[in-house]
Amino acid sequence: MGVGILVEHLNAWYGTTHTLQDINLHIPANHATALIGPSGCGKSTFVRCLNRMHETNPIARATGTVKMGDLDIYKDVSPVEIRRRVGMVFQRPNPFPTMSIYDNVVSGLKLNGYRNRKVLDETCERSLKAAALWDEVKDDLKKKSGASLSGGQQQRMCIARAIAVDPEVLLMDEPASALDPVSTSKIEDLIFHLKAQYTIVIVTHNMQQAARVAENTGFFLNGKMVEFDSTHKIFTNPSDKRTEDYITGRFG
Amino acid sequence: MAGRVKFQQSLDELKERLLVMAGMAEQAIQRSIEAYRTRNLSICELVFRSEPAINRLEREIDQMALDLLAMEQPMAIDLRFILSVIRINADLERVGDQAVNIAVRVREMGAFANIDLPVDIPKLASLAAAMVRKALESFIEADADAAEAVLKLDNEVDAMNDAAFYALSSLIKEKPELTPQSLNALIISRNLERVGDHATNIAEDVIFWVRGADVRHNVIKN
């Protein structure tokens, strides 16, 4: 099951640039939460702070508290452990090109030391079914490479790979921006179903997508979170003029 | 203001067309009252002739709004504006219908003697028409306070309509021979009360557009 995420006084820097400034919010468990804002506003940095990927850059640092359930991810657990608990899906699908579909999906499990064939088979099937890809690839699992699938299928395979390690949280950084409308719709349907199992945070430039998939939405601007509210409120009657100007396209 | 120039122009055009519609509906109601006051059937004819144009414009505005929803996917205040325009458009068309209904009654009354009735239709009409005017002014100015003031006028129109009902019902009992004139006046009073209701709806839509608050049925949401 998903866990709630509590962020308190989160600040992040790249070198001397203060990219996130005092972010505070509560992301509820088993909900989809969308983050919107113009390029460079800090939303991607924010999600990278939620799985400690931000700190993999040598000039980057972060302060503040991020709690997932009862765990303070910057104090109580290692970066490796937190990345098992927090799956991530990127803008462009990133299959391991030389691996079969099967190996792509179970790669995280193997990395964590699982070798039992039955467990791997079951996990592969369960994850691909959860990612709505099973029926399309079940006959070619070990014959075809992950890279041979279409873009939309690759992205769903990456989602299957992310959920194969049984995370609590799924971070999605513009997961459908490189996909056609049909594939986008499949990803959005997936998000709808997956949030029963996971807490989902999705960064998107597509405001209609945010409105369709997320219960809550946060608007970032210049490293600050201007407004966080129910998606309904944000897109029909936002409280802050800057949010309204952005979502109505009057920004700038 | 940067961004979405074409969309902004389209919103301005939509507003402009709605104001044309408003002008036609207002003129129709004023003409119908003038027809009542003067019992002039040629003015009734003008009201009947204006109806198809109002109906055409209603469809045109609806189509413009639908196109903007489909093509521009508006958000927040723009979305509320378009939704309000769609509703106001329907209310204006109904104001036009009420004008036609009044003109029909005036034509019927022409078959009977012009007598003094215990109801001040011109006064009721002027109040109902003022509500429509003020509601439209609040729309033009995007002024939610002014729209709120319109809501308060509706009670006065309702009270006048109620008073007309009792006065005319009594008259029918006392002088059954005046039933046709009384019934026609009663229906006109009711038509004007409905005009006041449409003005109220328009004012509520202006408040929704400007403030994002749904104040219909005396319930405030958001």
Image (spheres, rainbow, N blue to C red):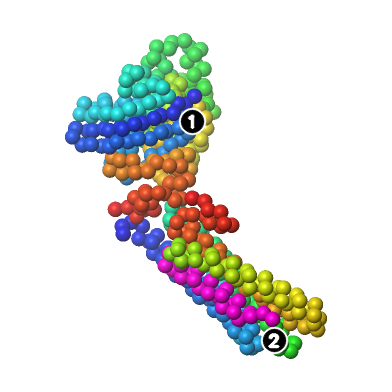
Could you say whether the residue bearing mark 1 is in a helix, strand or loop?
Answer: loop
The answer to whether any part of residue A154 appears in the image is no
Q: Are marks 2 and 1 in contact (CB under 8 Å)?
A: no
The x and y percentages for residue B72 are 43, 55
User: Residue B123 in magenta?
Assistant: yes
Residue at point 48%, 11% (across, down): A117
Residue at point 33%, 40% (across, down): A225
What segment carries the magenta color?
B118-142
* Viewer-proximal residue among B45 and A26: A26
Disc on res. A30? 1
Q: Amino acid at mark 2?
A: Asp
Residue at point 63%, 70% (across, down): B159
- Residue A235 appears left or right of B98: left
Which quadrant of the rendered structure holds the N terminus of chain B? bottom left
To which quarter of the image does residue A149 belong? top left
Q: Amino acid at mark 1?
A: Asn
To which quarter of the image does residue A72 belong? top left
- Residue B73 appears left or right of A18: right
The x and y percentages for residue B140 are 44, 68
* Main secondary structure along the magenta-highlighted residues: helix
Residue at the spot of label 2 = B116
The x and y percentages for residue A110 are 40, 15
In which chain is the residue bearing label 2?
Answer: B
- Residue B88 appears left or right of A81: right
Within 10 Å of disc 1 (Cα), the crowding (few <14, some 14-19, many 20+) is some
From the viewer's perspective, is residue A109 above or below residue A207? above
